[in-house]
Amino acid sequence: APGVFQLASLLVELDPSDEASRILCADALYQMGCVEEAHKLLSVALSRNPQRSPILARLALLQLKKGFMYDGNQLLKKVIKIGDTSCLLPIMDIFKDEDRKLMQRHCHFRALTILKNKQED
């Protein structure tokens, strides 16, 4: 992760508008346990392109990890509303095992709640 972070940082310096390098940099920071720094980097990337599912999904995980369930839900809703959920499976490979389980439990619980509410209606 430190080597990936250094490389991605150099790429961001060469082209500050390169979104893929920013995401790679944020992923490396996350892997190194620098969650706040990863969150800041993703927030900057999101401000430049607010409809990017890969950024929104990563931010959702970071919000859930911090215990901000409402914010995490809102970000996941945006990903679903955009319709580009294909980013979720590759991102799951990046997440640490405990965070992958957190995201899976959270999404499973939310899906069950939605189904239960629809059955009651």
Image (tube, helix red, strand yellow):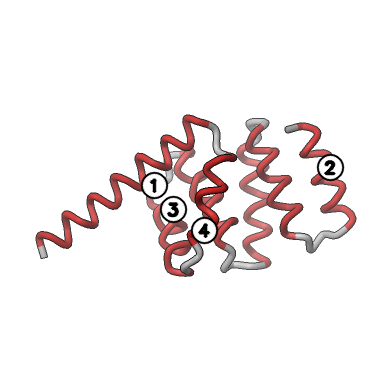
Instruction: Please tell me whether mark 2 or mark 3 is closer to you in this view.
Output: 2
Identify which residue is drawn at 89% across, 56% down.
14
Location of the N terminus (image quadrant): top right
Which callout, 2 or 3, points at the residue further toward the start of the chain? Answer: 2
What amino acid type should be assigned to the residue bearing mark 3?
Answer: Asp
Residue 56 location (% of width, % of height):
54, 57
Residue annotated with mark 2: 7
Dot 2 falls on a residue whose secondary structure is helix
Residue annotated with mark 1: 69
Which callout, 1 or 2, points at the residue further toward the start of the chain? Answer: 2
Identify which residue is drawn at 78% across, 60% down.
18
Spot the residue most to the right.
14
Location of the C terminus (image quadrant): bottom left
Label 3 crowd bin: few (<14), some (14–19), many (20+), radius 10 Å:
some
Q: Tell me, for residue 71, which label it has, or none.
A: 3
Residue 48 location (% of width, % of height):
68, 67
3D distance between C-alphas at marks 4 and 3: 21 Å
Residue 96 location (% of width, % of height):
54, 33
3D distance between C-alphas at marks 1 and 4: 22 Å
Identify which residue is drawn at 48% across, 60% down.
85
Residue 57 location (% of width, % of height):
52, 53
Which callout, 4 or 2, points at the residue further toward the start of the chain? Answer: 2
3D distance between C-alphas at marks 1 and 2: 33 Å
Residue annotated with mark 4: 86
What amino acid type should be assigned to the residue bearing mark 2?
Answer: Leu
Which callout, 1 or 4, points at the residue further toward the start of the chain? Answer: 1
Instruction: Please tell me whether mark 4 or mark 3 is closer to you in this view.
Output: 4
3D distance between C-alphas at marks 2 and 3: 31 Å
